[in-house]
Image (cartoon, helix red, strand yellow):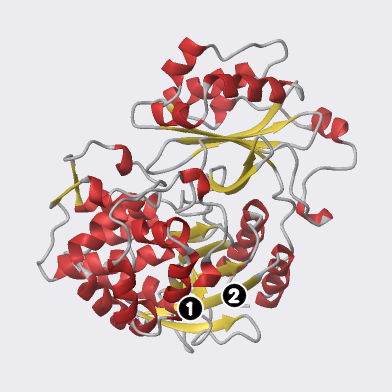
Amino acid sequence: MRRTLGAVLAGALLVPTASCTREYDDDMAARTTPPLVVQTAAPPEPASATTSPPDPALARQAAEPVDPAEGIADAELLEQTEWVLGLLEEGARGPAAEESVQRFAPTFLEQASVIQLGAIFAGLRGAAPYTVTSSGQSDGVGRTATLTLHAAEQPLVMTLGLDDEGRISTLLFQPDTSGEPPEIDSWADLDTALAELGGVSQVVVGYVGNGDCEVKHTTAGLDPADAAYPTGSVVKLLVLAAVADAVIEGELAWEDELTIIPEVKSLPSGVLQDREDGSTVTVREAAELMISISDNTATDLLIEAVGQRALRESALTAGIDPTRIMPVPTTRQLFQLGWQVDSEVRDRWSEAQVPERREAILADLPEELDLAPGSVTEPVWESGADWFLTGAEVCGLHARLQLQARTEQAGPVRDILAVNPGLTPPEGVAYQAFKGGSVPGVLALSFYLETSEPYGDPDAFPPEGVVLVVLTASGEPVDQLRAITIVEAGLQHLAQGPG
């Protein structure tokens, strides 16, 4: 399972990341970070946002140790995880330079030198011994393990990811701020719990039937027809809908091959940016990577394949205001707009009221993506640098995609949306689709559920499925571990029926 984490490298660089013990997608900011991230102290949070009891020494004594192998079935992933755990043991040394070259991906070592690795592991060993109290690995696409480590200080969440060659590409250590789940007996309770995160949050609950979304709840004081929020990679639902339309109309096929070229490579998250220039990927694989691990290069390949006109038509069909959303920037363009160009360009982007002006701004962006991944740290959504959707529009996208999936041509859409369920499906859920998004200051989560028993009053509105959308925007980094705990409680409430 996967979570989203925020962390600090050597206690200095604030960066957003994604990781996993609950099944959460590796999103836009997921790996636009130094590959080794260490935070030695939790960010300031209310007491309810931490799992540490008053006496941390007692916490370690009371923690029940588990064998990492119980939650990690991938033999190569387990072996690398156990190697890292060995480096954390009291009296351990290293890692040695030669072994580091063998164990870590070249892209990892480009950003974290062997000397840095030695110093960081030496610092972590200062809190040893560690007790592993939980372990798990990502489902579907991607190879990521997450463990909870108890020590003399606050528990840590360790996340380790492998590249296609089985080398360590990501290693994160983050204080566990997930906390206890809030009690959610009504949607107003979820609204209240989310206020703990700071910023502003919108909750939308909708019933889905025959391709439409009927909103049943939205946060008090926020009109879902007017309140557009930054959604990060949730916009990739729109890209998938445009791909499905193209497949249904015979303009594209799932087995068609897309060529990876330098001009379309984006920053992580994902894996395609590391593949060789000139290599190919099928439309089906690109779509799965785009949704399951939020692969940005896969997304840009698909945007290029369908074009802006198709995206506009899909937006209109799903009930999205095209004046606000068009043109849909590629992830590469969004990185440039948000963190590469001068703020004056963002100001013009924010002030542009019609698609034609935004098209001109995108056309003037630099040809090269010249941006260090670790520099993507500051929230820029307030300057308009994001993809803005309302909760009702996100619900409409889920409804539209499920309708498309009924066709023979677009049948794979249903499986693509469910590869990564986001969080463990609650009891009684027969099918769960998910797409999330995260950039600095933004966390967006959307779930489509089908329950094994009838949902609500079938005479009033017999929904085929139900949707929960949570959109949070803040001028500061969002405590995503705590947010996931809160949203998971909301998801459990959704599965229990209307309320």
When the figure is inspected, residue 403 is found, relative to residue 254, above or below; the finding is below
When the figure is inspected, residue 274 is found, relative to residue 24, above or below; the finding is above
Q: Position of residue 116 (x, y in %)?
A: 59, 24
CA gap between label 2 and label 1 equals 9 Å
Q: Position of residue 226 (x, y in %)?
A: 51, 87
366 on left or right of 465: left
> What residue sits 52% from the left and 24% below the top?
113
Q: Secondary structure at mark 2?
A: strand
Name the residue tied to disc 1.
390
Q: Position of residue 279 (x, y in %)?
A: 18, 39
Quarter of the view holding residue 223 = bottom right
> What residue sits 64% from the left and 65% below the top?
475
Q: Position of residue 135 (x, y in %)?
A: 59, 34
Quarter of the view holding residue 335 = bottom left
> What residue sits 61% from the left and 16% below the top?
86
In primary-sequence order, the first of circles 2 and 1 is 2
Name the residue tied to disc 2.
202
Mark 1: few/some/many CA within 10 Å (<14, 14-19, 20+)? many
Q: Amino acid at mark 1?
A: Thr
339 on left or right of 196: left
Q: Secondary structure at mark 1?
A: loop
